[in-house]
Amino acid sequence: MLLLVFCIGGEKIYNMNELKLINVSKLYKVGSYLSRTYVEAVKNINLEFDMNTPFIFTLAGESGSGKSTLAKLVLGIEKVTSGELIFNSKNIDNMEKQERKNYLKNVQPVFQNPFETFNPLRTVISYLYTTAIKCGNISTPGKKEEAQAIVQTNLDRVGLSYQEVEGKYPHEFSGGQLQRLSIARALIPSPKLLIADEPVSMVDASLRMSIVNLFKDLKDKYGVSIIYITHDLATAYYISDYIAIMLRGQIIERGDVENVLMRPLHPYSQLLKESILQPVPNKRRKGRARKASFEVEEFNLPGCKFTERCSFAEDICRRENPKEYYVEGRTVRCFLYEGEESSP
């Protein structure tokens, strides 16, 4: 039942609806022409997902950690600089037109700002119809009755009725309603995987849990897998089966959400957990968690990206980038656990 293969050696037979990231990296050019340099926004990511078993997998970390860049690579919005992104044994960069169309139907986005999902000059229902006609599983191309049935089905899935939506423009909906409509649009092609990039960050606090619970329902009732991208560890813990903590383009700890968030091993994961406000009356927090700044030099440091903020850092941490060690049911990228490895 394990959906996330930790890629520490061994060979695996490909399944249908399998997505693999193999040593995936992404470089960006920054600076002027005369002082141009590179930032490795994503570095050597290895992940494997079997979407035949529905899951919710969270990518967590502070701003600038590479979460959204990784999402863009999976969605095909950006191309990998090195490594491979494989769907059903086929590299997505080498797919023929029909193969790529099939991939994009299976992997759909839910963006952070729902107001950017829809054309403000068109009614939302017309947008959903167009999506159904072009991307829905319609037996007779262009058949309006089938398109309407697909639209109604997916509105029902997100807790909205056809009557609530018909004839209205995007500005006539609340942020929470519009995010539900954005999710309904993403469901129309019958995807196996949703990539939800900070989907509740622009929704009123009172409505956030309704969206989070909707994602749980999509997994449990309809078999849709979700990669949930967030900096909010509270919702990550509530919603996730598995989690990966990202820092400076690398995954530094990953595994079962209970293990990683309740018993974090990496000093950065521990810092993130301590940064969550605890509901303890009359107890004041000691100090403040210091966030990383977005400096090119810090991205390109040769050693561990957490060295400058880590109280355990040694000389080797500044010289070398630690490999992933499998410890206590998860992988962790830290020299503290060298020699403590166990078998996955």
Image (cartoon, rainbow, N blue to C red):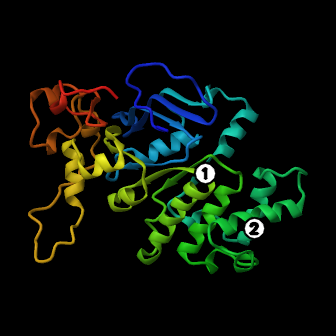
Q: In the image, is 233 to the left or to the right of 184?
A: left
| Quadrant assignment, res 111 | bottom right
- Graded by Cα atoms within 10 Å as few (under 14), some (14 to 19) or many (20 or more), the crowding at tag 1 reads some
Q: Report the amino acid beneath label 1.
A: Gly
Q: How many marks?
A: 2
- Say above or below: 285 vs 131: below
Q: Tell me the tag on residue 85.
A: none
Q: In the image, is 246 to the left or to the right of 93?
A: left
Where does residue 309 sit, x and y in percent of width and height?
15, 45
Residue 296 visible in the displayed image: yes
**Residue labelled with disc 2:** 152
Q: Earlier in the sequence, mark 1 or mark 2?
A: 2
Q: Secondary structure at mark 2?
A: helix
- Say above or below: 230 vs 281: above
Q: Report the amino acid beneath label 2.
A: Gln
The outermost residue toward the top is 10
**Residue labelled with disc 1:** 223
Residue found 27% across the figure and 44% down from its top:
295
Q: CA distance from mark 1 to mark 2?
A: 19 Å
Residue found 56% across the figure and 23% down from its top:
13
